[in-house]
Image (cartoon, rainbow, N blue to C red):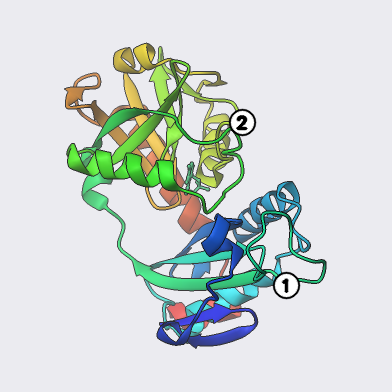
Amino acid sequence: MISYLNGHYLPKGEIAISPDDRGFLFADGLYEVMRSYDGEIFQPQAHIERLSYGAEQLRFQQMEFSFLIEVAEELIGRNQLNRGDAIIYIQVTRGIAPRLHKFPPPGTSLTVYATIRPFQPKTDEMTEGINVIFVPDQRWARTDIKSIGLLPNVLAQQRAMENNAAEAVFIRDGAITEGTRSNFFAVIGGTVITRPRTNYILAGITRKMVIEICQKSSIPFQERSIFETEAHEAQELFIAGTTVEVTPVVQIEGKNVGNGKPGPITMKLQKAFAELVHGTIEVTEKNFRNKY
Ligand code: PLP
């Protein structure tokens, strides 16, 4: 696989990162995960804007990352991933410097890394639904920043796997925040509900799309906290994210949600999201060549 590091395209195996990189030493970095469908990146600008927001919040010296859209397109082309789905992974750290907590001297370049891999969506989970577990949200209070410091997510996801669950959902003060790699939604009394955007959740791009679909399709929608107790009583639950798209949650810790089957509103949103993904693909000259 050809990857990208600081302006260079190299076979992934030849890429070396310094042990003094602040990403390695302090998890002082950000990441983004974008998806491409038949070579077309979904909402690239939104991912770059979120990366810039994180860079601003972390007071990085550079906050302009739109060049990474071109890098991602290069990775698709160089790795011949114009067909099928792929995941593009971007990681930006505060760069290389002797190990001191304070920021490195002005002029220290950020480390910018990007890679790609083919992606096989979990269609069985999307059609049949998943089991989730609830775990205490032990993350820091700035989870609106897509930080590479993911230890609570790693531990929670591992616990999910050990309990035959596909996702762990974080609970803070009795209310659901989000999943380890997804935003969380409930359908209660016919209304689609998700937690408002604050410092406690990531502003998911799929979340935004789901909200737009609700608004366009006149599906009642509300942003408010969902309490853990309410989730058990909800008619439908689902998660939303770049890798999971819209995936129904049919069990919490092995207990059925509703009748234990994906709900009608969830499936309607899943279908609408798929239409949106494929409908937004403009037939540019490049696409046209790749597809026909
Ligand atoms: N919340 C968390 C903690 C995530 O890690 C992710 C995605 O990685 C999401 C939500 C969903 O965000 P998006 O839809 O932009 O992928």
Q: Quadrant of residue 160?
A: top left
Q: Are marks 1 and 2 in contact (CB under 8 Å)?
A: no
In the rendered image, the quadrant that contains the C terminus is bottom left
Task: Locate residue 37, reporting x and y percent.
Answer: 44, 65
- For the residues carrying marks 1 and 2, which lies nearer the camera in this image? 1
Q: Residue at x 48, y 17 (%)?
A: 173
Report if residue 64 is visible in the image. Answer: yes
Q: Is residue 215 above or below residue 70?
A: above
Q: Quadrant of residue 116?
A: bottom left
Q: Amino acid at mark 1?
A: Ser
Task: Locate residue 34, reporting x and y percent.
Answer: 51, 60
Secondary structure under badge 2? loop
In the rendered image, the quadrant that contains the N terminus is bottom left
Dot 1 or dot 2, earlier in sequence: 1
Q: Which mark is residue 39?
A: none
Judge from the rendering whether residue 4 lies leftward or rightward of residue 64; answer left or right: left
Q: Is residue 225 above or below residue 284?
A: above
Q: Residue at x 18, y 22 (%)?
A: 255
Q: Amino acid at mark 2?
A: Arg
Instruction: State the residue in front, 182 or 247.
Output: 182
Instruction: State the residue in front, 152 or 122.
Output: 152
Task: Locate residue 28, reporting x and y percent.
Answer: 60, 56
Secondary structure under badge 1? loop
Q: Residue at x 55, y 18 (%)?
A: 224
Disc 1: CA contacts within 10 A as few (<14), some (14-19) or many (>=20): some
Disc 2: CA contacts within 10 A as few (<14), some (14-19) or many (>=20): some
Q: Which mark is residue 109?
A: 1
Is the residue indicated by label 1 positioned so its CB lies within 8 Å of ligand 1? Answer: no
Q: Measure the C-alpha gap from mark 1 to mark 2.
A: 31 Å
Q: Which residue is mark 2?
A: 197
Task: Locate residue 22, reporting x and y percent.
Answer: 60, 63
